[in-house]
Image (cartoon, grey):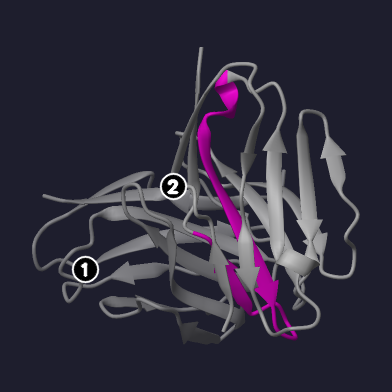
Amino acid sequence: AQKVTQAQTEISVVEKEDVTLDCVYETRDTTYYLFWYKQPPSGELVFLIRRNSFDEQNEISGRYSWNFQKSTSSFNFTITASQVVDSAVYFCALSGGDYGQNFVFGPGTRLSVLP
Amino acid sequence: DGGITQSPKYLFRKEGQNVTLSCEQNLNHDAMYWYRQDPGQGLRLIYYSQIVNDFQKGDIAEGYSVSREKKESFPLTVTSAQKNPTAFYLCASKGARKGNQPQHFGDGTRLSIL
C-alpha cells in the first residue's frame, strides 16, 4: 500500500524566514512520481512540481526548492524568504501503479506566514 | 483556456434530498476524480474513473454516486444516505493513463445542510 506522511500539521513563520515542509512516502512500486500542491484560502489546488523516482536531482524554481532523497523516502519542500502570499495548505502526493491509478495525498501542512 | 469547471460554487441541501455536483473538463483527460475535504483535513477519495462508462469506488464512496457517460463530464450525486455531507468537494482530472501526470483540480463546491 502507498502512504504519504506530512508530520507537520501547522507551521508559522515570520515573513522572510526560510521554511521547510517535510514529506515522507511509502511505496512498493519501483517507478513512482511525487508531487507538491498548494491550496490557498480560496480552496483550489495548484500543482507545483512533479518528480520521477529515478531522478534525484534537486530542483529550484525561484524561492521554491525541492529535495528528493530515495534513501530516506523523502521529498521535502523549502520556501526561501517566505512571503505572506505563501500562506496556504501544502499537500505532498504520490502516484504509482501502471496507470498512475494509485494516487495518494498526504494530510497536508498548513503554513502561516506572518507579516 | 483549458481547465476544469465545477458548479455550483456553493450548494445547500435539505434533509432527505439528493443533490448533484457538476464537473466538466475540456483538457481531453481520460481520468477524473472526486475528493471530499472536511475543514482542516486532507483529501479523501470518493470515486474515480479511468475511462468513459467505467468508475471505481474510492475510500469513502458510501452515500455517493457518479456517472461517466461522456469523457468531459463526471457528475457526483450526494444522496440522502450520506448523513454528513457538509464539506468541500473537489473534482480533478488527469491526462493519459500514466503515473507521471499530475491531477488538475477545479475550484471546488462547498456543500452545506440547511
* Mark whose residue sits in front, 1 or 2: 2
**Label 2 element class:** loop
Residue B89 in view of the camera: yes
Q: Are marks 1 and 2 on the same chain?
A: no
Q: Is residue B21 above or below residue A37?
A: below
Q: Is residue A32 left or right of residue B82?
A: right
Q: Which percent across, then down, holds residue A61? A: 83, 36
Toward which corner of the image does residue A63 lie, by quadrant?
top right
Q: Is residue B45 left or right of residue A94?
A: left
> Distance between the Cα atoms at labels 1 and 2?
34 Å
Residue at image point 79% right, 60% down: A69
**What amino acid is labelled 1 in the image?**
Asn
> Residue A104 is drawn in which quadrant?
bottom right
- Graded by Cα atoms within 10 Å as few (under 14), some (14 to 19) or many (20 or more), the crowding at tag 1 reads some
- Residue at mark 2: A9
Quadrant location, the N terminus of chain B? top right
- In percent of width and height, residue B26 lies at 67, 57
Residue holding disc 1: B18
Nearer-the-camera pick, A102 or B109: A102
Magenta part of the chain: A84-106
**Vertical order, A24 against A26 (above or below):** above
What amino acid is at disc 2? Answer: Thr
